[in-house]
Image: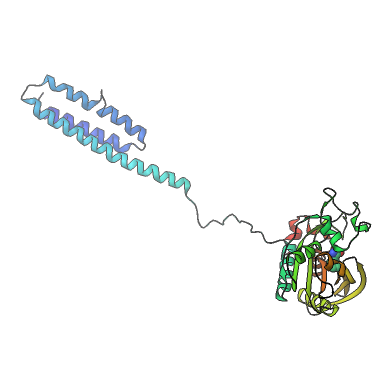
């Protein structure tokens, strides 16, 4: 084999390899080419095997050029490998590509329920008048819910048809007034608190829910009178519903207040019955260890749903718990 012969042959192999390698566009084809040229029975390996047929003088030179050929092909393969992995990466990016100018998926952000908003608003009004906010348990002992509030065994409110009893002693509280008792037992007068929370009664119609929200108020001090009571309630009505709102007190009865009143609020040309109130009964003071000769107290309790209905013109109280977004989204 002459010098010229094999040089030409090797150059052709290199040209062919370059051409093939540069055409490949994926790692599998590229690997096939590596096998074809550099593999155990590949073209370049076969050339190496020819060494033994050459004369000793020819061998070193031939070996050198075949090695060069192998290195060149190796370099071409490596370069193409780089290129392919780059385009493969790009096409993976293409698949993930996001058009930032497309309109986004709109995520709806919720808001507090109308009752929660009104409750917070009412709390803030009383806080601004010096009251603090306290809470009590919804599962209550009948002593706190009734006895301590001067409500004896025979009182109709204790009828199991009106209340949800858990056992003989425990029930779902029927009003927030037991928080008056809990507060007076744990604090010393003078004190002024409001206590919002859920209460439970066996009622269900357009104006009554079996579970609703009350806010209790209690102010105990020396020389507290009905005038203070009227002032707080009038102030509360005007701040909630606006300056045009008026209140009126009607005589009423609660076992734990004396005298007792129902309060109506005048708003949008109508009177609404919204709360019960009165001066803390001496027996209640005795039950919590306060001296009725020394202390006077005013107490009130109103329905947060009622206030919400008056303020926003809600006709059916049940709308407040139906979870119908068409209703709730209005506020
Ligand atoms: N607890 C009474 C009710 O649920 C309301 C009330 C509270 C009355 C405080 C007087 C004093 O109807």
Q: Position of residue 21 (x, y in %)?
A: 29, 35
Taking the spot 25% from the left edge, 33% from the top edge, the residue there is 17
Looking at this view, is 324 or 125 the one in front?
A: 125
Rendering coords of residue 74 (x, y %): 24, 35
Image position of 211 (left or right of 45)? right
Q: Is residue 325 left or right of residue 245?
A: left
Vertical comparison of 277 with 32: above or below? below
Can you see residue 43?
yes
Task: Give how far across and how far down residue 274 sits, in percent.
Answer: 85, 68
Name the image quarter holding residue 259: bottom right
* Color encoding of the figure: rainbow
Viewport quadrant of the C terminus: bottom right
- Relative vertical location of residue 224 with respect to residue 180 in this rendering, above or below: below
Relative to residue 285, is residue 324 depicted above or below? above
**Image quadrant in which you'd find residue 293:** bottom right
Quarter of the image with the N terminus is: top left
Can residue 273 be seen here?
Answer: no
Seen at 47% across and 45% down, the residue is: 95
**How many numbered circles does the render carry?**
0
Q: Quadrant of ligand 1?
A: bottom right
Residue 131 falls in image quadrant: bottom right
Nearer to the camera, 131 or 109: 131
Q: Is residue 41 left or right of residue 250?
A: left
Residue that extends furthest to the top in the rendered view of this protein: 53
State the residue lying farthest toward the left.
57
Name the one closer to the observer, 199 or 279: 279
On the image, the x and y values in percent for residue 183 come to: 75, 65
């Amino acid at each position: 084999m002459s010098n010229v012969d094999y040089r030409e042959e090797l150059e052709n192999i290199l040209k062919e390899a370059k051409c093939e390698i540069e055409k490949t566009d994926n790692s599998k084809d590229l690997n096939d080419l590596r096998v074809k040229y550099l593999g155990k029975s590949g073209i370049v390996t076969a050339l190496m095997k020819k060494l033994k047929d050459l004369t000793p003088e020819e061998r070193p030179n031939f070996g050198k050029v075949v090695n060069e050929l192998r290195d060149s092909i190796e370099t071409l393969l490596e370069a193409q490998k780089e290129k392919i992995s780059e385009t493969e990466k790009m096409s993976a990016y293409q698949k993930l590509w996001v058009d930032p100018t497309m309109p986004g998926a709109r995520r709806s952000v919720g808001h507090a329920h109308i009752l929660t908003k009104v409750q917070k608003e009412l709390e803030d009004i009383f806080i601004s008048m010096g009251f603090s906010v306290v809470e009590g348990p919804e599962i209550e002992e009948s002593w706190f819910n009734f006895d301590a509030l001067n409500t004896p065994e025979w009182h109709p409110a204790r009828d199991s048809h009106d209340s949800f009893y858990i056992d003989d002693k425990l029930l779902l509280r029927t009003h927030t007034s037991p928080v008056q008792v809990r507060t007076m037992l744990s604090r010393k007068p003078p004190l002024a608190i409001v206590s919002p929370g859920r209460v439970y009664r066996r009622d269900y119609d357009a104006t009554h829910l079996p579970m609703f929200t009350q806010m209790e108020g209690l102010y105990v001090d020396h020389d507290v009178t009905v005038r203070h009571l009227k002032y707080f309630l009038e102030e509360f009505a005007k701040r909630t519903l606006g300056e045009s709102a008026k209140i009126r007190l009607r005589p009423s009865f609660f076992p734990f207040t004396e005298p007792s009143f129902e309060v109506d609020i005048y708003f949008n040309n109508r009177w609404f019955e919204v709360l019960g109130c009165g001066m803390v009964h001496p027996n209640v003071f005795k039950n919590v260890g306060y001296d009725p000769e020394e202390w006077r107290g005013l107490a009130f309790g109103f329905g947060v749903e009622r206030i919400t209905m008056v303020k926003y013109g809600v006709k059916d109280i049940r709308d407040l718990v139906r979870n119908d977004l068409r209703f709730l989204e209005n506020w």
